[in-house]
Image (cartoon, rainbow, N blue to C red):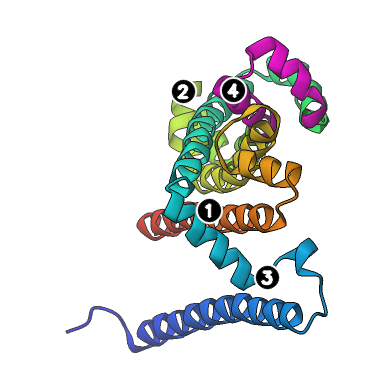
Amino acid sequence: MSTYSDEHLEYLKKKKHETIIVHVIRISIIVLFLVIWEVLARVGAINTFLSSSPSQVFTTVFSLIKTGSLFGHIWVTLYEVLISFLIASMLGFVIATILWSNKIVAKIIDPYLTILNSLPKVALGPLIIIWVGASVNSIIFMALLISAFITIINIYNGFISTDKSYITLLKSMKASKWQIFTKAVLPSNLVTIISACKINVSMNLIGVIMGELLVSKRGLGYLIMYGSQVFNINLVITSVVILGVISYLLYFIVEAMEKKFIVKRK
């Protein structure tokens, strides 16, 4: 016998139906876009030399798989994204915690965070290569520059937006700052932290690709640069499409973690 009421079961059924509709529409939009793109390419409405086509993209993918190079390039990019994501997430959490715990430090650092976050990181590319060297380290460093500051800002803003009534209640019970953080601030912002990670993933992917465009000899960013140099538009578009798929999968993984966590909290 079900422990849920009829109203709750009806609500769950409605939510499931809405989820299915959303996924169907998402897939339909992608399929429709690909069909229109392919039709326009076949009738000559667009120049496939400049814009490629879905059939040429699939042909390029199979060609890269056949040569055994595709998965190696994907793995290099994923590895760099994963490392930079973990470092940026940990840095963001630790620094945001320090800023929350010390208001004076926060007042000193806050304007610098805003300035550093607004800097055009690509312009620093040549300096990064000089400082770190033309290696994987410079790619990860570029990704960190792009993702770390926004992660710090988002998590810190979540911390300082915690319901003041919780904090006041704990202070009235003589709770320490650490107890306030672990009992009120952190539990109230776990969803905020996961949301920051969602942004962090996409920002790290952008940073890694920028880094690979500058110094890498492997990775999807390298394929884009190489394709541009030899004017192989099919290779460029294929790499961009693969990046889009990877970005969606990474976002989907973090989103699934967020939903699972929210359900557990409820």
Q: Are marks 1 and 2 in contact (CB under 8 Å)?
A: no
Q: Nearer the viewer, residue 66 or 25?
A: 66
Q: Earlier in the sequence, mark 4 or mark 1?
A: 4
* Mark number, residue 95: 4
- Disc 2: which residue: 178
Question: Which tag is nearer the camera, tag 1 or tag 2?
Answer: 1
Mark 1 lies on residue: 246
180 or 9: which is nearer to us? 9
Relative to residue 218, is residue 256 drawn left or right?
left
Helix, strand or loop status at disc 1: helix
Question: Disc 4 or disc 2, which is closer to the eye?
Answer: 4
Q: Which of the two marks, 4 or 3, is nearer to us in this view?
A: 3
Up/down of 32 relative to 127, above or below: below
Pointer 4 local density, CA inside 10 Å: few below 14, some 14–19, many at least 20: some
**Amino acid found under the numbered disc labelled 4:** Ile
The numbered mark, 3 or 2, whose residue comes first in the sequence reads 3
Q: Residue at x 58, y 29 (%)?
A: 92
Question: Which element is circle 4 on?
Answer: helix
Residue 253 is inside the magenta segment: no
Give the magenta-colored segment's residue range.
122-150
Q: Amino acid at mark 3?
A: Ser
Instruction: Name the residue beneath numbered marker 3.
Output: 53
Q: Is residue 7 above or below residue 214?
A: below
